[in-house]
Amino acid sequence: MADISHAKDGSGNIVVASLNKLINWARSTSPWYFQFGLACCAIEMMATAASRHDLERIGMMPRSSPRQADVMIVAGTVTMKMALRVKRLYEQMANPKYVISMGSCATSGGPYCQYGYHVLKGVDLVVPVDVYIPGCPPRPEALIEGLLKLQEKILDERPIQDTVSKNLKTLFSKENKQSSATPSAVPAE
């Protein structure tokens, strides 16, 4: 029979951590990525999600809608026509949202950089990029490494302090503006 003496004194199954760490742990271990492949890097992204590498082992779950995704993986060449659509899809994602630039074409235009007038010279000109993955095309292991780096970045964030301090600043700045804009009325006797 198993020893259950630790359960009687209350020392078992207790987690003590700050709320930020708990929230970041939950957010970092379950990011949902938006399936958005543009060129040959998309084949490597699909191979990473397949059974051999299996992104769901590290908590990455594919989503087909930007409204349900936390991470956009831009895999491949972004043309000038596609840049507007990339930005629109990024704006449809809920906050907090992250972008991974996968491959040399998405990062800097790739081999089309010098003579390709139709190719965007890096997706970071359209949307903010959190992690760059080099290669042409990058191996599935490189994508997994980039996703693990993104998880580390999420663990280091401070969502509660940033949100609360921003809301308090806007609240007090509105009160100060309203109190200085309206003069106090003195009752006449």
Image (cartoon, grey):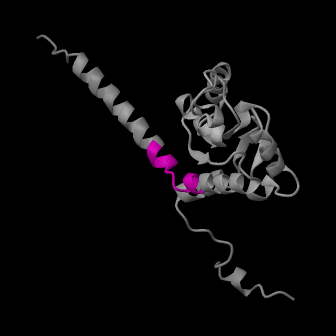
Q: Position of residue 58 (x, y in %)?
A: 74, 57
Q: Position of residue 33 (x, y in %)?
A: 72, 42
Residue displayed at 58% across by 47% down: 131
* Quadrant placement of the C terminus: top left
Residue displayed at 66% across by 48% down: 135
Q: Is residue 163 above or below residue 54?
A: above
Name the residue nearer the viewer: 62 or 129: 129
Quadrant in which residue 11 is drawn: bottom right
* Quadrant placement of the N terminus: bottom right
Q: Is residue 86 above or below residue 55?
A: above
152 lies left or right of 182: right
Magenta span covers which residues?
152-162
Q: Is residue 96 magenta?
A: no
Magenta span: helix, strand or loop, mainly?
Answer: helix
Q: Does the magenta stretch include residue 160?
A: yes
Whether residue 97 is visible here, answered yes or no, is no
Residue displayed at 53% across by 55% down: 20
Quadrant in which residue 185 is drawn: top left
Whether residue 137 is visible here, answered yes or no, is yes
Query: In the displayed image of the protein, which residue is found farthest to the top?
Result: 188
Residue displayed at 86% across by 58% down: 52
